[in-house]
């Protein structure tokens, strides 16, 4: 249960971050904004490492896991730039809906493929998620689009 | 149409990114995994900056005096918290449940921000339809965890 609550809290933090990043990007440009985010992130994560007494080992460079971390970092940048590029070109509700469909679809597949975590509950839950999301992001009767930062 | 495809593809990339950072943290531990994630991201931005220095993406609109503020460090710190949380959560409850719970959190927060127009978001009432949407998503999350 605690991990589900933590995930929910990280979702809340994502929205705050998207909004603040938007303000930062409008002031100094997207590339500099993302650069500052990842620079301060690296410093903060490094400080955490020091506080916890962990050290970087030379063997980390040759580890397979470093490739996972590097790919994740690069994908983090790529998704941020794609998101920023799409914001002005596609309706917000459509973008949120499609992005979540992609996320949930690939996560169900990866859970099944890598961790053998497939279940009927996950599929039914996924359908509920999409239904709820469609309701949440649906256009108003007046034709005004529902905006969301998710 | 290509933007529609790019939207769901972007979502898929986010799913893969969370999985990879989770796997890296399984080996390195969440602290080191989070550090390497940000270091790789920062290196990638530096490369992009070198290639797209003259691009629109790199143009600032604010005056020099207003350009930088101390609170600009906030997204980086929050990003560390998010990555760290994902690193410890994804290997334990799986990607789907973690993403579903994060989705619920995102929608509740975006709804609240729209309700009060926080951080420059357009104001929009948190009506019954949105509340019903969140209730259905919560039901979906429960189904995922329970069965």
Image: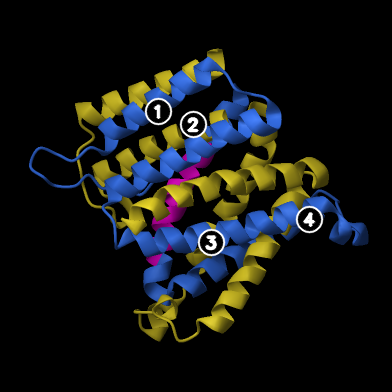
Chain colours: A blue, B yellow
Q: Chain of mark 3?
A: A
Q: Chain of mark 1?
A: A
Secondary structure found at label 4: helix
Asked whether the residues under the numbered discs 1 and 3 touch, taking CB atoms below 8 Å apart as contact, a structural biologist would say no
User: Which residue bears the numbered disc 2?
Assistant: B100
User: Which residue bears the numbered disc 1?
Assistant: A129
User: Which residue corresponds to the image point at 61% horizontal and 25% vertical from the top-left?
Assistant: A2
Asked whether the residues under the numbered discs 2 and 1 touch, taking CB atoms below 8 Å apart as contact, a structural biologist would say yes
User: In terms of sequence position, does the residue under pointer 1 or pointer 3 come before the other?
Assistant: 3
Q: Chain of mark 4?
A: A
User: In terms of sequence position, does the residue under pointer 4 or pointer 3 come before the other?
Assistant: 4
Q: Left or right: B111 with respect to B87?
A: left
Characterize the local packing of mark 4: few (<14), some (14-19) or many (20 or more) Cα atoms within 10 angstroms: many
User: Which residue bears the numbered disc 4?
Assistant: A66
Secondary structure found at label 1: helix
Count of numbered tags: 4
**Residue A10 magenta:** yes
Indicate the quadrant containing the N terminus of chain A: top left, top right, bottom left or bottom right. top right
The quarter holding residue A101 reads top left
**Magenta residue span:** A9-23
Q: Chain of mark 2?
A: B
């Amino acid at each position: 249960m605690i991990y589900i609550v933590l995930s929910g809290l990280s979702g809340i933090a994502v929205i705050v971050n998207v909004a603040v990043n938007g303000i930062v990007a409008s002031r100094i440009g997207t590339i500099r904004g993302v650069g500052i985010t990842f620079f301060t992130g690296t410093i903060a994560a490094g400080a955490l490492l020091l506080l916890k007494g962990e050290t970087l080992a030379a063997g980390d460079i040759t580890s397979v896991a470093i490739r996972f971390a590097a790919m994740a970092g690069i994908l983090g940048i790529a998704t941020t730039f794609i998101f920023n590029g799409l914001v002005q070109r596609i309706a917000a509700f459509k973008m949120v809906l499609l992005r979540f469909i992609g996320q949930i679809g690939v996560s169900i597949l990866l859970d099944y493929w890598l961790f053998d975590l497939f279940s009927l509950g996950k599929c039914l839950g996924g359908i509920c998620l999409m239904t709820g999301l469609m309701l949440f992001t649906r256009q108003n009767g007046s034709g005004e689009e529902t905006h969301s930062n998710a | 149409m290509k933007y529609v495809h790019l939207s769901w593809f972007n979502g898929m990339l986010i799913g893969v990114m969370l999985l990879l950072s989770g796997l890296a943290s399984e080996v390195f531990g969440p602290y080191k995994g989070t550090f390497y994630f940000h270091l790789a991201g920062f290196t990638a931005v530096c490369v992009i900056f070198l290639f797209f220095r003259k691009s629109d993406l790199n143009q600032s609109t604010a005056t020099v005096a207003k350009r930088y503020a101390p609170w600009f460090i906030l997204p980086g710190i929050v990003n560390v918290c998010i990555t760290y949380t994902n690193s410890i959560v994804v290997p334990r409850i799986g990607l789907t449940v973690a993403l579903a719970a994060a989705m619920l959190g995102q929608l509740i927060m975006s709804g609240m921000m729209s309700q009060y127009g926080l951080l420059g978001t357009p104001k929009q009432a948190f009506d019954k339809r949105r509340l019903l949407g969140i209730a259905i998503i919560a039901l979906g999350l429960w189904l995922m965890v329970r069965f």
